[in-house]
Amino acid sequence: MRPYPVLLFLLAVVYTACRPGQPQVEQAQAEEEVDLNEFYNFYQSFHIDSAYQMDHIIFPLQGLPANADSITIARNNYHWEREDWILHQPVDFETSEFRREILPLSEEIVLEKIVHRSGQTGMLRRFAKIGDDWYLIYFADLNRIRQ
């Protein structure tokens, strides 16, 4: 078999994939706007109603304890249990030493990063929409952040 038809085919594929003006799939997804109104309603209820909070956590909850050691981090098998859960309270991010970033990863997954102003420590929470409700599905308590 002569290599020319295969080479021409590959060149055509590369040319088509790299043509200017063609939308890239990754860029299109990154530019999508996710409506977080429903999430923010959940988020408010989650922090003001203890029964609601407990009903909207998937236990055992995967995550990390505060000040986790390297062995706990490497094992990646820590889980929060219902009986050990300390309720999360609302934080006024305008007056606290922490800043918050809400990152919608999709219509159904939201990542929350809460980082101390020094940039040295932080925590992560991941929320998922399952059916019609939002749930906390991951919580890494306050730990040092790798620099």
Image (cartoon, rainbow, N blue to C red):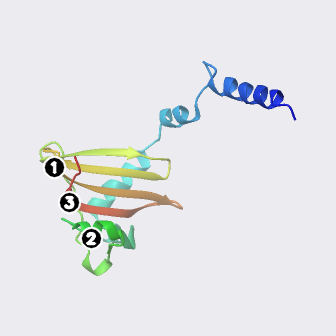
Gap between marks 3 and 2 measured at Cα = 16 Å
Secondary-structure class at tag 2: helix
* Total residue callouts: 3
Residue 12 occupies quadrant? top right
For disc 1, the marked residue is 120
Q: Badge 2: how crowded within 10 Å, few (<14), some, or many (20+)?
A: few
For disc 3, the marked residue is 142
From this view, report whether residue 32 is shown above or below residue 141: above
From this view, report whether residue 97 is shown above or below residue 48: above
Q: Residue 71: which disc?
A: 2
Gap between marks 1 and 2 measured at Cα = 20 Å
Q: Position of residue 30 (x, y in %)?
A: 48, 36
Amino acid on which disc 3 is placed: Leu
Residue drawn at the location 49% of the way across and 47% of the way down: 106
Along the polypeptide, which appears first: circle 1 or circle 2? 2
Along the polypeptide, which appears first: circle 3 or circle 2? 2
Nearer to us of marks 1 and 2 is: 2
Answer with left or right where residue 109 lies relative to residue 118.
Answer: right
Q: Position of residue 24 (x, y in %)?
A: 58, 30
Nearer to us of marks 3 and 2 is: 2
